[in-house]
């Protein structure tokens, strides 16, 4: 009697497992972004770098972003498929400067990338510091974005010298777009008086932005350049004091971070929380912030609206 | 002198510190009161399990946009009853049943968190607590839960004690022992949920056990140990909060370390005297 | 001498009890008069505790019925007091003798109400009755085996129980304390209570008990100690060895 039950249970488990494996394998082949045509397979850690790669590479590249839209790059946890993607990549683009954290090094090690080229974009641009450490959020300054974009073009040319004209052409066009963005931003902010140019953010991610457009960073809810730490009581008290003193008009929260603390600070200081800024990641592909340029534009609009 | 008073009062000029203080003190009081039962009935593993098992409830609450606190309450009660029921029914040891449930539910919570990508939930807050982020409604909810637990424990004190000491005798005299067991588990779940705000999933067990164990080193009777434990717990909470403010430490672990230090000091002092 | 349902303190008829698949007790029939002290003897595993659980109303009967002063145990809850075996109690629980005896008042006090002065007086009287008032502030796990038994008896008194079931009251208790306990129990019997005590110790049966019930999954014997322990009964209970050790511990009559 018992044996009958045992056999039935085994059969049920085998069938379930079979269905599961079948479903997984189906998933892999149908949604694999890495095509079998002759394209350069690029894996980028963030959608921002991915966007740049697509702009420069055009049809010659196929890009996968490891970190999905809306997810915090500091606390991202890669899965097994991410390892597989890196293993099959021709080029891996990442920020470096400790933005991605140890998981990236482990991932690269795991994926055994002798055949791929790995490019850290952060160290190539002139960096600033925040809280005594190198601030990795360089892409918030279009001028530095330009440097990175040109570096990507060079890298693609090294990999695929045949299409050198395509890459140079795309890069030049995109750099022009970036310059337009920069000019537009400066002119938009020219209407904003200096004393209103205060930024309170969720974490220290707008250093380069502030540097470029003459803003003052009053403080951040999570002090420091990563979101992995929580503020202590004295840090929270310090921020509340700083906000009151600077008469800041808004607390800017990025979409991917926990906003409980910010709301408490907002309640206590009377300064409203403004949502919508995107820093670490782009919005969804077909949304209004799906590219670097549109994302930056939207950020400028949000900031302008809140502080004016 | 003025400076000392200033140092004591200064942190609480911030309303977030005031809320943190209220919740921390409530945690420091309620945990050892229930902790008296935990220590004497060996419910430590059960308590740890309940703390972990409410994770999916909190994640779902986040997904629905309601306070994770509220999400944890129904799940906590359900899990407490489920664990109580299954450990009676299964022929495996209670340890095994509880272990399976707790690990499974905790893993479910982690998977839910990664599936709901972009959810503004900080795993560190859930694991270690973040009492600095409690809102006014959280404070009221905590007060409500704490009051409920206190009333229930007071009202059913003699029956709960009888059932804990001699369940067979209790049954003979006509007490509903099964219901009493479930009642205690549900109260334990509510206190754990309160404590999650301040010390997180990982450290709840410490606040349940340590101040209570310290109290039992000092006094003999059960009700006295409850009261003394509450005092020690509340004291640890307050000192921990001050340490967090002036020494820039995370508040949950600070509270736990103070409670542990108190235990060590008392344990050592007793040895010297004896 | 059979006693009727309504007259008996304890009326057990055709009782059988199953634990899982096993039939632990079968064909149990006996009656106990009020004001008596009954010894229940038998080997370990023979069903003594199971019988007590059934009488106390916390175990389901497979067949038959149990009446306590004319009522099934579920209806006579307050009247039955159970002094459990060592293993069933959580000794780690920090209660004083007084605390334990106060537990006996739970039913009388009722839900949601607190103890009154009367309750406190009854607790004190119970402790004095068993000679444990001096030890009222001692923790239960600091007491000796015999002292603990007396505290539990005091609890039964505080409960105002009419039937006391003592399961293995003598295990872990030295002989002198055993005698002390028996003295207390006999006084309680004289006062109008019915006491059943399970034991596997056959010494001094005659001096201790009014009647004995020998159980080894069924009733092996029931009656006065002198008549109950024939060699056949002893063999049924304990095998061939039983014959040598029975009958008043070396007192061969």
Image (cartoon, grey):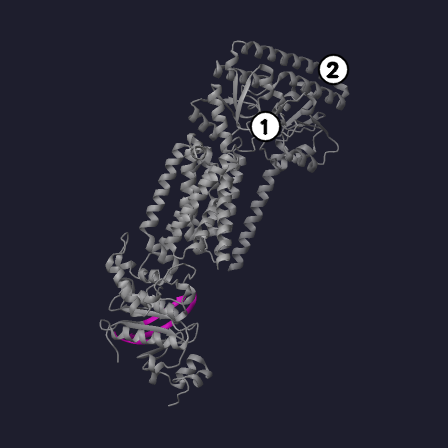
Q: Mark 2, chain letter? A: A
Q: Position of residue A137 (x, y in %)?
A: 61, 24
Q: Which residue, given by chain and number where applicable, does mark 2 sit on?
A: A165
Instruction: Count every numbered label the image shows and give the total.
Output: 2
- In this picture, residue B230 sits left or right of residue A15: left
Residue C194 in sight in this render: yes
Which portion, as a residue range, is magenta?
Answer: C14-38
Q: What numbered label is drawn on residue A225?
A: 1
Q: Which circle's residue, 1 or 2, is located before the other in the chain?
A: 2
- In this picture, residue A8 sits left or right of residue C158: right
Q: Are marks 1 and 2 in contact (CB under 8 Å)?
A: no
Q: Mark 1, chain letter? A: A
Quadrant where the N terminus of chain C lies? bottom left
Most common SS among magenta residues: strand
Which sits in the foreground, A50 or A143? A143
Q: Residues within 10 Å of mark 2 (few under 14, many from 20)?
A: few
Residue C35 lies in the magenta stretch: yes
């Amino acid at each position: 009697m018992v044996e009958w039950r045992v056999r039935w249970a085994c059969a049920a488990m085998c069938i379930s497992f079979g269905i599961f494996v079948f479903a997984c394998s189906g998933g892999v082949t149908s949604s694999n972004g890495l095509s079998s045509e002759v394209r350069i397979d690029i894996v980028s850690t963030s959608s921002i770098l991915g966007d740049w790669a697509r702009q420069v590479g055009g049809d010659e590249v196929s890009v996968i972003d490891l970190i999905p839209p809306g997810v915090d790059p500091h606390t991202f946890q890669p899965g097994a498929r991410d390892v597989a993607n890196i293993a099959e990549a021709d080029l891996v683009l990442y920020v470096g400067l400790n933005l991605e954290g140890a998981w990236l090094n482990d991932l690269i090690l795991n994926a055994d990338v002798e055949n791929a080229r790995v490019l850290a974009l952060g160290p190539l641009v002139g960096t600033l510091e925040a809280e005594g450490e190198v601030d990795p959020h360089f892409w918030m300054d279009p001028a530095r974005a330009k440097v990175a974009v040109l570096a990507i073009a060079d890298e693609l040319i090294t990999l695929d010298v045949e299409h050198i004209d395509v890459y140079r052409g795309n890069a030049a066009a995109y750099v022009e777009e970036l310059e337009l963005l920069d000019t537009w931003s400066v002119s938009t902010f020219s209407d904003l008086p200096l004393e209103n140019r205060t930024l309170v953010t969720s974490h220290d991610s707008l250093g380069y932005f502030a540097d470029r457009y003459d803003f003052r960073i009053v403080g951040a809810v999570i002090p420091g350049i990563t979101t992995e730490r929580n503020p202590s009581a004295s840090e929270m008290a310090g921020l509340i004091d700083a906000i009151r003193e600077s008469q800041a008009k808004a607390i800017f929260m990025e979409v991917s971070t926990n906003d409980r603390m910010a709301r408490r600070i907002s309640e206590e200081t009377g300064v409203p929380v403004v949502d919508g800024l995107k820093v670490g990641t782009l919005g969804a592909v077909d949304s209004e912030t799906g590219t670097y340029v549109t994302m930056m534009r939207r950020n400028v609009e949000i900031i302008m609206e809140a502080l004016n | 002198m003025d400076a000392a008073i200033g140092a004591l009062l200064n942190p609480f000029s911030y309303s977030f510190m005031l809320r943190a203080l209220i919740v921390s003190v409530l945690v420091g009081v309620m945990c050892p009161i229930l902790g008296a039962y935990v220590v004497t009935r060996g419910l430590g593993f059960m308590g740890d399990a309940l703390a972990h098992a409410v994770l999916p409830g909190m994640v779902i609450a986040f997904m629905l946009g309601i306070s994770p606190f509220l999400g944890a309450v129904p799940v906590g009660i359900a899990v407490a009853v489920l664990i109580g029921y299954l450990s009676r029914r299964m022929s495996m040891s209670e340890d095994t049943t509880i272990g399976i449930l707790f690990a499974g539910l905790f893993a479910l919570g982690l998977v839910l968190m990664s599936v709901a990508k972009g959810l503004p939930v900080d795993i560190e807050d859930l694991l270690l607590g973040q009492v600095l982020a409690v809102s006014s409604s959280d404070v009221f909810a905590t007060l409500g839960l704490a009051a409920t637990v206190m009333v229930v424990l007071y009202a059913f004190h003699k029956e709960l004690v009888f059932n804990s000491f001699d369940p067979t005798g209790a049954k003979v005299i006509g007490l509903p022992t099964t219901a009493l067991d479930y009642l205690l588990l549900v109260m334990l779940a509510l206190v754990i949920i309160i404590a999650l705000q301040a010390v997180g999933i990982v450290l709840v067990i410490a606040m349940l056990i340590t101040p209570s164990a310290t109290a039992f080193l000092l006094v003999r009777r059960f009700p006295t140990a409850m009261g003394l434990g509450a005092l020690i717990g509340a004291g640890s909470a307050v000192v921990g909060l001050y340490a967090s403010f002036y020494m820039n430490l995370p508040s949950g672990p600070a509270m736990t370390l103070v409670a542990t230090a108190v235990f060590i000091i008392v344990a050592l002092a007793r040895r010297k005297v004896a | 001498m059979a006693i009727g349902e309504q007259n008996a303190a304890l009326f057990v008829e055709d009782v059988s009890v199953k634990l899982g698949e096993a039939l632990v007790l079968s064909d149990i029939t006996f009656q106990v008069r009020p004001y008596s002290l009954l010894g229940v003897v038998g080997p370990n595993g023979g069903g003594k505790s199971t019988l007590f659980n059934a009488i106390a109303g916390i175990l389901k009967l497979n067949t038959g019925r149990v009446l306590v002063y004319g009522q099934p145990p579920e209806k006579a809850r307050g009247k039955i007091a159970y002094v459990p075996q060592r293993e069933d109690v959580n000794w780690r629980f920090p209660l004083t003798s007084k605390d334990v005896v106060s537990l006996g008042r739970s039913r009388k006090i009722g839900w949601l109400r607190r103890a009154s002065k009367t309750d406190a007086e009854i607790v004190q009287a119970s402790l004095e009755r068993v000679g444990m008032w001096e030890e009222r502030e001692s923790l239960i796990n600091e007491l000796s085996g015999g002292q603990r038994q007396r505290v539990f008896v005091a609890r039964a008194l505080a409960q105002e129980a009419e039937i006391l079931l003592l399961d293995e009251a003598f295990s872990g208790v030295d002989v002198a304390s055993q005698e002390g306990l028996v003295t207390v129990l006999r006084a309680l019997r004289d006062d109008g209570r019915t006491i059943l005590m399970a034991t596997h110790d056959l010494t001094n049966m005659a001096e201790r008990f009014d009647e004995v019930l020998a159980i080894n999954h069924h009733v092996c014997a029931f009656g006065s100690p002198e008549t109950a322990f024939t060699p056949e009964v002893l063999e049924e209970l304990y095998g061939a060895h039983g014959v040598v050790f029975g009958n008043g511990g070396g007192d061969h009559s």
